[in-house]
Image (cartoon, rainbow, N blue to C red):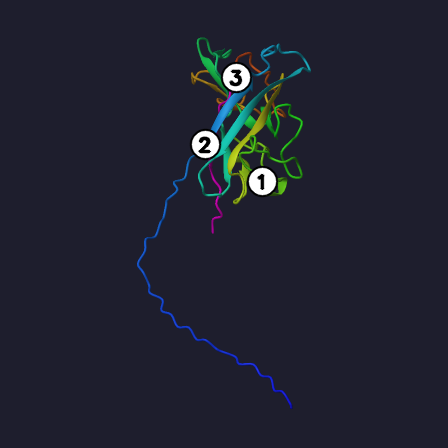
Amino acid sequence: MRKLSFAVIFMLLFSYNVYAQSGTIEEFSIDGGSLSISIEHEDQINPTQDRWTIALGGTATFQKTDRITVTDLSGKNEGWKVRVDLSNFKNSTPIADPTCYGAELDVFVNVEEWMSFRLFDDAELLNELGQGGTLLTPVSSYGTPVSSGNYVVNNFITDSGTFDLLRVNPGYGAGEFDFYLQCNITVSEWLPNGTIIKSNDMKGAFPNDNPVKVNNQLQKYQIFAATYRTTITYSVSGNPVLE
């Protein structure tokens, strides 16, 4: 007797309905914080040597360092740029006009003739920022280090006025960052070309003209004994890509 075997396959079909139900949508808003800058003067201009006596062939270099802190909590991730505004040097103490009794002089020295900048990532001034330079590191873990390919340093002073000192590319720079600006002021016994010497009395008369614009090929003028001052103003703003 032949035995047959077979399988019975049951296919069960299930049907179901989906009923849409109204629900609630949860949403929340985040407000951006601030983009801010603060300056701390690490030291005064050579506090132990802030005076110089004019000497033949002599020069003097005065230095100061500012710690600059940029805090970017804006929530834009657009990068930022630090700008500085520089005034030309001017005497802040009186200078007697030797060509006119009772008159006084104002002496204006182009800031680029006496001042230069360098930027560093550390207080010891060992790690210089710039093309191919060191990382711009955040304070603690409040951000991600920025490589030199994602920031631009411009510390070459060409004139008074405002210019970008440090630009961090969009997409970088969120958090808090410290860096250090070393300011060097170098003077000699002769006033540099382009210096303006102006008397407050039109009867005052230096050779050639009043005011005098110094041209050392025609006439040299010894630096006037006085106190000289420049003003450095810092600001920070976002650095988005602009079409």
Q: Nearer the viewer, residue 145 or 200?
A: 145
| Circle number at residue 228 | 3
- In the image, residue 11 sits, relative to residue 92, either above or below, namely below
Q: Nearer the viewer, residue 34 or 13?
A: 13
Q: Is residue 162 visible?
A: no
Q: Rounded to the nearest whole Å, what is the CA distance between mark 2 and mark 3?
A: 30 Å
Task: Return the x and y of residue 215 as percentages of the image width and height.
Answer: 59, 26
Q: Which residues are magenta?
A: 229-243
Asked if residue 242 lies in the magenta stretch, the reply is yes
- What's the amino acid at mark 3? Tyr
Farthest residue, direction right: 57
- In the image, residue 194 sits, relative to residue 149, either above or below, namely above
Task: Count residues near mark 3 (Cα–Cα under 10 Å), then give few for <14, some for 14-19, many for 20+.
Answer: some
Q: Nearer the viewer, residue 239 or 207?
A: 239
Question: Quick one: SS at disc 1?
Answer: strand
Please state which of the two labelled residues, at mark 1 or mark 3, is closer to the viewer: 1
| Circle number at residue 151 | 1
- What's the amino acid at mark 2? Ser
Q: Earlier in the sequence, mark 2 or mark 1?
A: 2
